[in-house]
Image: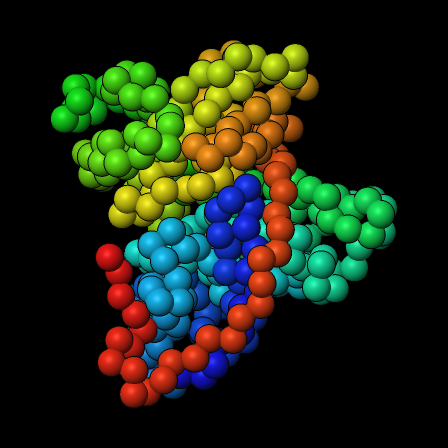
């Protein structure tokens, strides 16, 4: 394996490891096609085996180089010249179709690294192709530094309301929305829980139950692209006092196979925005204050309508945490690592 170069950021506490060098080539004309190759569903006789790329994912997301909460992205070519670059999002269990906090981190990285020109004071737009479509990041600058990033998502569509889901804590009603990936929303109080770090084992366990129970349910199917179907994350949320700008909620998002989002979840915030707007709780010009289980905050708003749903924007911060050059010693018996 070639040495792997990364630049690491966190967005509201959730890590994002940007892989900038050492990747094997990933064939495909679009980011969505490259994700299919990464999943082992594509490729050619001359392309590297799909497992070569996945070895890199495992190397970076497993101990001792990573951890169970690690998240990252492989920077790949854009679908066309209208975007600056593409990205394949990954986590410890595989490859996701969307990642809002990652888009925020990528926007900051693109400007901070000089890949995309930006003013010392003002805003620069970074256009990124992801498996679910084209997203953009407005990188806000003041005094020569990045102060915040606003992520504009693909359209978000509400696909099911009040779906009865049996759990070990009783039957609950779940709402479903597609915001680049499918998210299931449920009130934590309906499960007898609160969104606090000391309740994370229970929140994680019931989140996994709900995701399993909803597998292949009608509301989890994307109406246009089957590659985006299936529940990716379960958002367990609770109400906080409204702000003068609009509603306020705290959430924890359980995604993949029991992974916890430390941030308020960027794409998940888009799902919450669409549901709140559908309920009449988020009006024109209002914003959602969305707090994570560790107390960090994203703000979000609905900025328009689209045939495929509503257009949302989510604002947060991203901070660089380091640069790394990872290697795999061929004599290391642990290979690409382990999970506990």
Q: 153 above or below 109?
A: above
Task: Quadrant for the C terminus, please.
Answer: bottom left
Q: How is the image coloured?
A: rainbow
Pick the quarter of the image with the N terminus: bottom left
How many numbered markers are drawn? 0
Q: In the displayed structure, does residue 108 sit left or right of residue 18?
A: right
Tell me the residue at 82%/44% (across/down): 142
Would you say 141 lies left or right of 201 here? right
Height in image: 63 above or below 2?
Answer: above
Q: Image check: 121 left or right of 318? A: right
Query: Residue at point 37% right, 70% down?
Result: 59
Residue beneath the point at 70% across and 64% down: 113
Res 184 seen here: no
Is 257 drawn above or below residue 280 in the view shown? below
Q: Residue at x 56, y 46 (%)?
A: 11
Q: Can residue 92 be seen by looking at this rendering?
A: yes
Across and down, in percent, residue 86 comes to: 56, 61
Looking at the image, the residue that sits furthest to the front is 198
Q: Position of residue 91 (x, y in %)?
A: 38, 56
Q: Position of residue 226 (x, y in %)?
A: 34, 47
Q: Position of residue 72 (x, y in %)?
A: 47, 58
């Amino acid at each position: 394996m070639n040495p792997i170069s990364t630049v690491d950021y966190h967005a509201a506490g959730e890590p994002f490891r940007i892989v900038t060098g050492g990747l094997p080539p990933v064939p495909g004309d679009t980011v969505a096609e490259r994700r299919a190759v990464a999943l082992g569903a594509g490729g050619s006789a001359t392309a590297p085996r799909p497992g070569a790329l996945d070895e890199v994912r495992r190397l970076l997301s497993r101990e001792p180089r990573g951890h169970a909460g690690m998240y990252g992205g492989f920077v790949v070519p854009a679908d066309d010249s209208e975007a600056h670059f593409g990205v394949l999002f990954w986590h410890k269990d595989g490859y996701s179709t969307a990642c809002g906090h990652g888009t925020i981190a990528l926007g900051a990285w693109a400007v901070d690294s000089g890949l995309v020109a930006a003013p010392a004071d003002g805003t620069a737009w970074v256009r990124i192709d992801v498996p679910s479509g084209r997203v953009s990041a407005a990188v806000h600058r003041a005094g020569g530094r990045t102060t915040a990033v606003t992520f504009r998502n693909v359209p978000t569509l509400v696909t099911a309301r009040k779906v009865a889901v049996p759990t070990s804590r009783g039957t609950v009603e779940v709402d479903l929305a597609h915001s680049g990936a499918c998210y299931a929303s449920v009130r934590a109080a309906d499960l007898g829980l609160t969104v606090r770090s000391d309740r994370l084992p229970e929140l994680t366990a019931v989140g996994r139950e709900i995701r399993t129970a909803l597998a292949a349910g009608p509301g989890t199917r994307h109406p246009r692209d089957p590659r985006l179907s299936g529940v990716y994350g379960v958002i367990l949320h609770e109400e906080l006092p409204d702000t003068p700008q609009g509603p306020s909620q705290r959430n924890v998002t359980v995604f993949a196979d029991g992974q916890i989002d430390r941030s308020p979840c960027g794409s998940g915030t888009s799902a919450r925005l669409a549901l709140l707007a559908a309920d009449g709780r988020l009006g024109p010009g209002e914003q959602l204050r969305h707090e994570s289980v560790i107390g960090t905050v994203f703000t979000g708003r609905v900025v328009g309508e689209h045939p495929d749903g509503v257009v949302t924007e989510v604002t947060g911060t991203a901070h660089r945490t380091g640069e790394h050059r990872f290697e795999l010693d061929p004599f290391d018996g642990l290979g690409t690592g382990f999970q506990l």
